[in-house]
C-alpha cells in the first residue's frame, strides 16, 4: 500500500515514525511519502517537507505567517494529488490537516486521522466536519471516546503512542559522561520545538540557574535548531544542551520545567516531577481565554481531570513563580504526591501498542474497499 502522512510538529513526527514502523511490520509492501521530520525520515520513504517550516502557534502567529501556511497547504494538496496514495494519514495538527482532509475526501482518497484534533477544547462543532471528511478517527486520550459519542460519532480508542516510545526506551548509562555532566542533580528544561515557544519560555527557565545554584541545568534542544541558536539565550550561564536525547535527560533529572504539550505527558510517564509553563502573544492568549472551554492546558491534568502538575500561564510564567513551584518538587511531600499521582495516571493510560493497533485498523479498513 502507498501511505501519505502529514505531521506538522515534533510530537507528530514521533508518532508518525512509530506508526510507519508498525505499518511496515504488517505490510511488507508499504511505501511512504510525508510531511514530517527526522524521526519519520529515519523510517524511510520520501520526506516532502520538514515540520520546522510549518509549526506556528497562536492566533496572531498564524495570521502573520498565513502566506507561508497557504503555500505549504498548496504544496501538500498538489503532492497528494500527484501521487494518489491508498491512504492519507493525518496526525494531529488540525488547523492544517482538516483542510487537507476536506480536499482528499473530495478527491476520493481514503482519510485516516491519527491522534484526533482537540475539538473538545474549543469550537466543538468541528466534529460535524470531521464526521463528513474523515473515514476513520483514532483517539489516544481516554476521555475523547465519550466526547465524540456525544456528537454521534464512533471512534477508535487505540491507547497512547507515547507508551510505545517509552516502552522502547533504554537509558544510556554513558549519558552523563557524554555531556560532561557531574553527579550533581540535574534540572531539565524543555522549552518546546517552535521558535515562539523557545523565545518566550527559555529565558524564564534559565533564570532558575541563579536561584538554584546547586543544580546542573540541561536544555532539551529541538533538532530543527542549532547550538548557536540556543547559545544566544544561554549566554555565559553554565547550561548544557542535549539534542535527540530528551528521554535520557529526563531519566537523569531530579525535576523539569516543561512547555505545555506532548512533553508534559512524556515527562509524567517517565515519572519526573515537573512544572508546566506556557506563554503566547497577548492577543493570542486573550482570544484563547475567550474561546477555549477546558479547565486545564496540560495533558496530565486533562486526563486526570484534576490538577496534578502546576500550570503557569502567561503572566504567571515568570521567574519568581516558576521557582516557587519547582523548588518544593526537588524534595519533600509535594514531590511524593506528584509521583503518586503519576502512578494513577499510568494505570489510566493503559498498555503500549497504540501504533500497532492503529496500523491494524487502517489495513483492515483498506481491505474493505
Image (cartoon, rainbow, N blue to C red):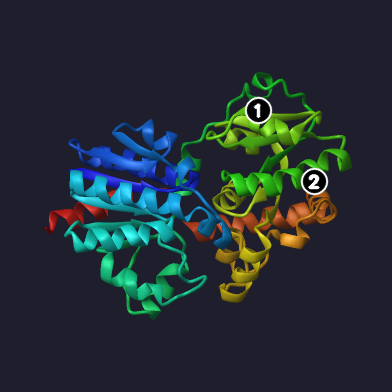
Q: In this view, does 182 lie above or below 283?
A: above
- Taking the spot 26% from the left edge, 52% from the top edge, the residue there is 88
- Taking the spot 68% from the left edge, 66% from the top edge, the residue there is 307
Give the image quarter of residue 296: bottom right
Q: Is residue 309 above or below residue 72?
A: below
Q: Please provide percent x and percent y for residue 281.
A: 65, 59
Helix, strand or loop for disc 2: helix
What number is the disc on residue 69? none
Screen quadrant of the C terminus: bottom left
Q: Name the side, left or right, on which 321 lies relative to 22.
A: right
Q: Please provide percent x and percent y for residue 7.
A: 40, 48
Residue reaching furthest left?
A: 369
Q: Say which of 350 and 156 sits in front.
A: 156
Graded by Cα atoms within 10 Å as few (under 14), some (14 to 19) or many (20 or more), the crowding at tag 1 reads few
- Taking the spot 19% from the left edge, 45% from the top edge, the residue there is 82
Residue that carries the numbered disc 2 in the rendered image: 330
Residue 248 makes an appearance in the image: yes
Helix, strand or loop for disc 1: helix
Q: Please provide percent x and percent y for residue 330.
A: 80, 46
* Separation (CA) of disc 2 from disc 1: 30 Å
Q: Name the side, left or right, on which 263 lies relative to 94.
A: right
Residue that carries the numbered disc 1 in the rendered image: 228
Residue 217 makes an appearance in the image: no
Screen quadrant of the N terminus: top left
Q: Is residue 245 above or below residue 295?
A: above
Q: Say which of 134 and 364 sits in front.
A: 134
- Disc 2 or 1, which lies upstream in sequence? 1
Q: Name the side, left or right, on which 37 lies relative to 308.
A: left
Q: Name the side, left or right, on which 39 lies relative to 312.
A: left
Question: Closer to us: mark 2 or mark 1?
Answer: 1
Q: Say which of 205 and 364 sits in front.
A: 205
Amino acid at each position: 500500500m502507498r501511505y501519505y502522512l502529514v505531521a506538522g510538529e515534533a510530537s507528530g513526527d514521533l508518532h508518525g515514525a512509530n506508526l510507519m514502523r508498525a505499518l511496515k511490520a504488517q505490510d511488507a509492501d508499504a511505501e511512504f511519502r510525508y510531511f514530517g521530520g527526522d524521526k519519520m525520515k529515519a523510517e524511510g520513504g520520501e520526506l516532502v517537507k520538514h515540520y520546522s517550516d510549518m509549526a506556528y502557534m497562536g492566533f496572531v502567529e498564524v495570521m502573520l505567517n498565513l502566506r507561508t501556511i497557504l503555500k505549504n497547504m498548496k504544496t501538500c494538496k498538489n503532492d497528494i494529488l500527484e501521487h494518489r496514495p491508498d491512504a492519507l494519514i493525518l496526525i494531529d495538527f488540525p488547523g492544517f490537516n482538516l483542510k487537507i482532509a476536506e480536499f482528499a475526501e473530495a478527491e476520493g482518497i481514503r482519510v485516516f486521522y491519527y491522534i484526533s484534533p482537540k475539538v473538545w477544547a474549543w469550537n466543538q462543532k468541528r466534529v460535524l466536519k470531521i464526521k463528513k471528511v474523515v473515514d476513520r478517527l483514532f483517539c489516544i486520550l481516554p476521555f475523547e471516546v465519550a466526547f465524540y459519542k456525544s456528537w454521534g460519532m464512533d471512534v477508535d480508542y487505540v491507547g497512547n503512542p507515547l507508551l510505545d516510545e517509552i516502552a522502547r526506551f533504554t537509558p544510556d548509562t554513558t549519558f552523563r559522561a557524554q555531556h560532561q555532566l557531574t553527579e550533581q542533580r540535574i534540572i531539565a528544561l524543555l522549552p518546546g520545538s517552535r521558535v515562539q515557544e523557545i523565545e518566550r519560555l527559555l529565558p524564564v527557565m534559565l533564570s532558575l540557574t541563579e536561584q538554584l545554584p546547586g543544580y546542573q541545568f540541561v536544555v532539551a534542544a529541538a533538532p530543527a535548531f542549532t547550538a548557536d541558536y540556543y547559545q544566544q539565550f544561554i549566554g555565559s550561564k553554565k547550561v548544557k544542551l542535549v539534542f535527540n536525547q530528551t528521554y535520557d535527560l529526563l531519566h537523569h533529572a531530579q525535576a523539569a520545567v516543561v512547555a505545555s504539550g506532548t512533553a508534559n505527558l512524556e515527562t509524567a510517564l517517565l515519572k519526573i516531577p515537573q512544572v508546566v509553563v506556557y506563554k503566547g502573544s497577548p492577543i493570542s492568549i486573550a482570544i484563547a481565554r475567550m474561546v477555549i472551554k477546558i479547565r486545564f492546558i496540560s495533558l496530565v491534568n486533562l486526563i486526570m481531570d484534576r490538577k496534578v502538575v502546576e500550570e503557569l500561564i502567561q503572566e504567571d510564567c515568570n521567574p519568581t513563580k516558576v521557582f516557587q513551584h519547582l523548588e518544593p518538587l526537588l524534595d519533600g511531600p509535594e514531590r511524593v504526591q506528584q509521583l503518586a499521582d503519576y502512578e494513577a495516571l499510568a494505570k489510566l493510560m493503559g498498555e503500549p501498542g497504540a501504533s500497532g493497533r492503529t496500523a491494524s485498523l487502517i489495513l483492515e479498513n483498506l481491505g474493505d474497499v
